[in-house]
Amino acid sequence: MDFLNNLEKKMNEKNLNKSQLAKGMGVAPSTVNSWFNRSAENITLKTLKKLADFLDCSIDSLVYGDTNKKNLEEYFLQALTSYIEEKRK
């Protein structure tokens, strides 16, 4: 899942449209529209932080999605379990 899909998901969770997002962040609606029209290729870290704060989420969840953290945690849990089992042998 890419940034724009993650952003759209977060907006849907908060029942926000592009205009409401722009107003809430204090940016021009054309700014938000440009993210969707140009794939947000030039979005700054400062803007990502502001966006994450407004949407009450992490920058990671905007950029990588919510599932990556869960998948990573599951991977490390499985790796740790395998390691412990090997040590018991």
Image: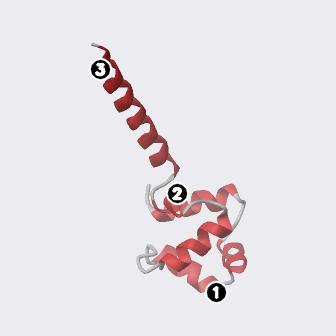
Tell me how many marks there are: 3
- Of 87 and 39, nearer the camera is 87
> In the rendered structure, which disc, 2 or 3, sits on the residue that comes first in sequence?
2
**Position of the N terminus by quadrant:** bottom left
| Residue 79: % across, % down | 34, 31
Where is 84 relative to 72, above or below? above
| Residue 82: % across, % down | 33, 24
Quick check: marks 3 and 1 in contact, CB under 8 Å? no
Q: Secondary structure at mark 1?
A: loop
Where is 30 relative to 9, above or below? below
Quick check: marks 2 and 1 in contact, CB under 8 Å? no
Q: Secondary structure at mark 3?
A: helix
Where is 26 relative to 6, above or below? below
Comparing labels 3 and 1, the label whose residue is closer to the camera = 3
Classify 10 Å Cα crowding around label 2: few (below 14), some (14-19), many (20 and above). some
- Of 79 and 63, nearer the camera is 79
Residue under the image location 71 percent in, 59 percent down:
14
Residue under the image location 66 percent in, 62 percent down:
56
Q: How far apart in space, not on screen, are marks 2 and 1 (Cα)?
A: 24 Å
Q: Secondary structure at mark 2?
A: helix
Left or right of 8? Residue 42 is: left
Left or right of 6? Residue 54 is: right
> In the rendered structure, which disc, 2 or 1, sits on the residue that comes first in sequence?
1
- The residue tagged 3 is 87
Where is 65 relative to 53, above or below? above
- The residue tagged 2 is 61
- The residue tagged 1 is 28
